[in-house]
Image: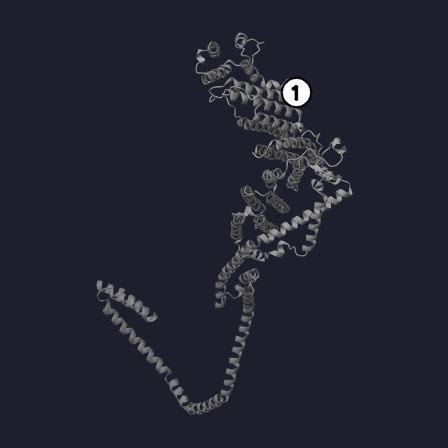
Amino acid sequence: MAENGDGLGTVPEHERILQEIESTDTACVGPTLRSVYDDQPNAHKKFMEKLDACIRNHDKEIEKMCNFHHQGFVDAITELLKVRTDAEKLKVQVTDTNRRFQDAGKEVIVQTEDIIRCRIQQRNITTVVEKLQLCLPVLEMYSKLKEQMSAKRYYSALKTMEQLENVFFPRVSQYRFCQLMIENLPKLREDIKEISMSDLKDFLESIRKHSDKIGETAMKQAQQQKIFSVALQKQNNVKFGKNVYINDRIPEERNEVELKRGFEEEDENEEEILTVQDLVDFSPVYRCLHIYSVLGDEETFENYYRKQRKKQARLVLQPQSNMHETVDGYRRYFTQIVGFFVVEDHILHVTQGLVTRAYTDELWNMALSKIIAVLRAHSSYCTDPDLVLELKNLIVIFADTLQGYGFPVNRLFDLLFEIRDQYNETLLKKWAGVFRDIFEEDNYSPIPIVNEEEYKVVISKFPFQDPDLEKQSFPKKFPMSQSVPHIYIQVKEFIYASLKFSESLHRSSTEIDDMLRKSTNLLLTRTLSSCLLNLIRKPHIGLTELVQIIINTTHLEQACKYLEDFITNITNISQETVHTTRLYGLSTFKDARHAAEGEIYTKLNQKIDEFVQLADYDWTMSEPDGRASGYLMDLINFLRSIFQVFTHLPGKVAQTACMSACQHLSTSLMQMLLDSELKQISMGAVQQFNLDVIQCELFASSEPVPGFQGDTLQLAFIDLRQLLDLFMVWDWSTYLADYGQPASKYLRVNPNTALTLLEKVHKGMKDTSKKNNIFAQFRKNDRDKQKLIETVVKQLRSLVNGMSQHT
């Protein structure tokens, strides 16, 4: 029962499996069959049985169907056999027709193929034309780029590159030649940068070489403009009756000649003068600036340009070692600097941003400091005033030129004031030589005049006024020597030379007046005074020459007021102005005159010493000669002749010289008596010496120089007179008794002097007595005299010792 139940359950399952096998694809049969083996153990067998039963049922159905359609199949085969013959005929006909069509279509095929090939070529040509039309502008632009590069039109080439990159290359970027062009453009840009930089370097080198020419042209233009302005201003002043410029008071002929020469040169060179644009081709700078601007590297170019120009500025500012020797050295130095800054000023105004005003101001300040240091150092070596003056003129033109280009030049004019002091020093040295030559050539004699013409010549040179001299008939003499008008003329020339430096310094008349007076004072107080003092102290200058020098200084002192008027006429500044400097000529010539007076006293004393050295006294003589010594008479005659020359001197000078000479003679005679080498003096020698002193007193009383009151000059010999009277009268008792009394007869006799001379006389008396008589010591009178002398000597010694203790 159980088995039957299981069998009933499996039959529907097998049917389902068979249905799946029949209805599904053979690829899916595997899983269905696997389910048969997964069932009960006898399921496989039962399935096979069921499968066989199903196959038999299908065979029966197929057989029924074949039997049903068999007649129709037979009929169809019979029909096919009937149309077989027709089909073969039709095949032959179709084959023949196909062959004929094939033969007829071969030519059409060939022509069709030709047409197709032509169509393809036409299409390709059209495509090529379109592509070429697209590529031709690129190639044309690139060719244009090459031509621009060859023609060195680099800025245009860069613009062409921009068009290629922005417009043309994007259209043909798919082609290989375009890629090659694109790859080549950076190299071209670098080539352009290198070439433009090379051109810039050549330009910088060129302007470095031509800076002096540029500067020379600019300075010449500035100078001619200044000459024109001065001439125009002068014409206006003349037109309106004004006279306000110092330059107008410089000798008119000289000014007119210089102006005429300046205008003639201007007319000759008007067509030759070129501007900086004519002398220099600035296109490399513009080109390089544009190129770097297009390349976006403008800052690099600006930095490079400024750096190179600063280097060139340092080279330009470096002077030559021997620049101070000639004016050409200074001119070359200035023209190079002017050329440098003229170029920079042009670059500043024609380019935007390459150089700025701040940059040029910084560069100028640096240059100005260097220029001032160089000029201050090199000008210190200049010893020629003409060279210093030319240097000043160059500095003025240099400053005016650069001022015209907007550069501040106040420091240069301040430097000119320093150079002005140096110029004055060189002038003083030069005029020192001029004065020395004048003094060397002077004969130190009054100027002789034989006719009216010679008189007018001297008066025209020197402002001399003397009504008494004018009334005298010819021939006559000026009191001063030839050096006086020469010195006066040279002082005026010095003022002119000093004035030359003040021209074009943009200073007022008051300042120029002050400068002229100060420089003239230096000339008088330092140079002329020094030359006079050196002249006075020269050994070969005698008393006559010294007298003439004193007379000369007197007239030069009187001429100082005319020099002040001369300066006033030049500057038009009144001497009554509060701040007007006075000339110190009065003190200068007074000092020189005092020095000459002192030298007269010294030389006169030296001359007296020379005569005194000729004295040859016999200090052992027993009796005097009865007349004065020959040397003394010669000395007195010499003094008389000299004092006659002194009549032209101021009274006090002659009197002082005469008194000094007499005092010196008295002192020399006293020293002769008291000489330590003189051991003994006889009374005969004392008497002879007394005769000489008497001659001196007679000379003093003869009033060799007028103006002394009473016996003032004789008092120079009072010491000698009282001393000799003491010995001649032998009045020792009175001397000793009245010593120290105001009314003493021998008030001027010093005890020490009296003691010294008495000892010498005492020894002389002893020797004389011994020579005359060997038995003199036994004479009572001689013994008494000896005792008296010894007593006086003791008293004098005690008096001297008492004075020493009191002192």
Q: Quadrant of the N terminus?
A: bottom left
**Residue labelled with disc 1:** 708
Q: Would you place residue 385 above or below residue 197 in this image?
A: above
Position of residue 211 measured from the top left corner of the image (x, y, whole percent): 57, 52
Residue 226 appears left or right of 683: right
Tell me if mark 1 has few (under 14), some (14-19) or many (20+) residues whose alpha carbon lies within 10 angstroms of its own: some
Classify 520 as above or below 384.
above
Residue 713 picture quarter: top right
Can residue 611 be seen here? yes
Give the image location of residue 14, x and y in percent: 28, 67
Q: Is residue 581 visible?
A: no
Image quadrant in which you'd find residue 597: top right
Q: Quadrant of residue 483?
A: top right
Element carrying mark 1: loop
Percent position of residue 195, x then y: 52, 60
Q: Which of 527/717 is in front?
A: 717
Decide: is 152 above or below 57.
Answer: above
Above or below residue 658? Residue 564 is below
Q: Report x, y in % for residue 244.
A: 72, 39
Residue toward you, 146 or 425: 425
Question: What's the residue type where badge 1 is placed?
Answer: Phe
What coloring was used for the rendering?
A: one colour
Lateral position of residue 397 relative to residue 165, left or right = right
State the count of labels: 1
From the viewer's side, name the closer residue of 92 and 434: 434
